[in-house]
């Protein structure tokens, strides 16, 4: 693979992390502040918002760990170590982090359902399912790539022994 395409992919990985970081620094604290004001006014729905904010902040950790593993995987490709056990481990970790993110948002789904019921917005539940299915797709894709890469490494080792 040409170095230019891996540089582009590394840049894309970095660019994927910037909006999430901005959201964690600017948007989520603003929502928490508004939830504080709602609690002072006597609203109990703010506790549901706190539950969602907690899940969002916690899910940022495996998200960035997954991005880091993606960056490492691209570095292995740059170093011509794409067909190595290191790449298989990186894909396994990406799969694990994606499953963790999906699980966190499954836990958050009841909070979304409560908010949807209060706001009379049933479409909110479907929107709440998007991160679950998106991260499951990433987990399945990483698992398939991991298995294919492991089989390719096994075939390569077999051929090296024959020669």
Image (cartoon, rainbow, N blue to C red):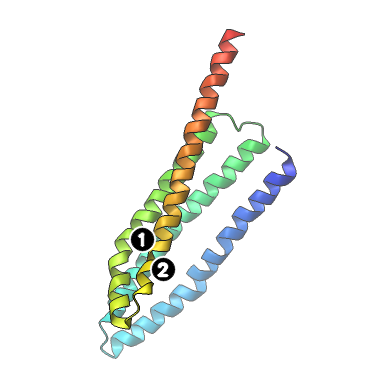
Crowd class of label 1 (few under 14; some 14 to 19; many from 20; radius 10 Å)? many
Locate residue 33, reporting x and y percent.
40, 81
| Res 76 → quadrant | top right
Locate residue 44, reporting x and y percent.
25, 82
Give me the C-alpha separation between circle 2 and circle 1.
11 Å
- Residue at the farthest bottom position: 41
Locate residue 5, reporting x and y percent.
71, 45
Which of the marked residues, 2 or 1, is nearer the chain's N terminus?
1
Q: Quadrant of the N terminus?
A: top right
Seen from the viewer's position, the closer of residues 58 and 114 is: 114
Crowd class of label 2 (few under 14; some 14 to 19; many from 20; radius 10 Å)? few
Q: Secondary structure at mark 1?
A: helix
Picture residue at 34% right of the left edge, 54% below the top: 103
Q: Relative to 131, say whether 84 is above or below.
A: above
Picture residue at 58% right of the left edge, 41% below the top: 73
Report the mark closest to the observer, 2 or 1: 2
Seen from the viewer's position, the closer of residues 126 and 98 is: 126
Seen from the viewer's position, the closer of residues 124 and 6 is: 124
Would residue 62 be found to the left or right of residue 71 on screen? Answer: left
Locate residue 40, reporting x and y percent.
29, 88
Q: Quadrant of the C terminus?
A: top right
Seen from the viewer's position, the closer of residues 63 and 161 is: 161
- Residue at the farthest top position: 163
Q: Which residue bears the numbered disc 2?
A: 127
Picture residue at 68% right of the left edge, 45% below the top: 6
Picture residue at 55% right of the left edge, 18% below the top: 157
Q: Are marks 2 and 1 in contact (CB under 8 Å)?
A: no
Q: Relative to 35, say whether 103 is above or below.
A: above
Give the number of the disc on residue 105. 1
Q: Secondary structure at mark 2?
A: helix
| Res 3 → quadrant | top right
Q: Relative to 45, say whether 23 is above or below.
A: above
């Amino acid at each position: 693979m040409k170095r230019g395409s891996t540089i582009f992919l590394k840049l894309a990985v970095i660019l994927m992390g910037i909006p999430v970081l901005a959201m964690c620094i600017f948007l989520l604290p603003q929502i928490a502040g508004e939830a504080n004001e709602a609690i002072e006014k006597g609203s109990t729905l703010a506790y549901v918002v706190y539950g969602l904010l907690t899940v969002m902040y916690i899910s940022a950790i495996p998200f960035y760990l997954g991005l880091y593993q993606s960056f490492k995987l691209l570095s292995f490709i740059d170093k011509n170590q794409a067909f190595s056990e290191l790449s298989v481990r990186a894909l396994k970790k990406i799969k694990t982090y994606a499953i963790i993110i999906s699980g966190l948002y499954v836990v958050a789904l009841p909070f979304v359902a409560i908010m949807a019921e209060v706001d009379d917005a049933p479409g909110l539940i479907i929107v709440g399912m998007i991160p679950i299915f998106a991260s499951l797709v990433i987990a399945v894709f990483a698992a398939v790539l991991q298995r294919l890469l492991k089989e390719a490494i096994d075939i390569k080792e077999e051929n090296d022994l024959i020669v």
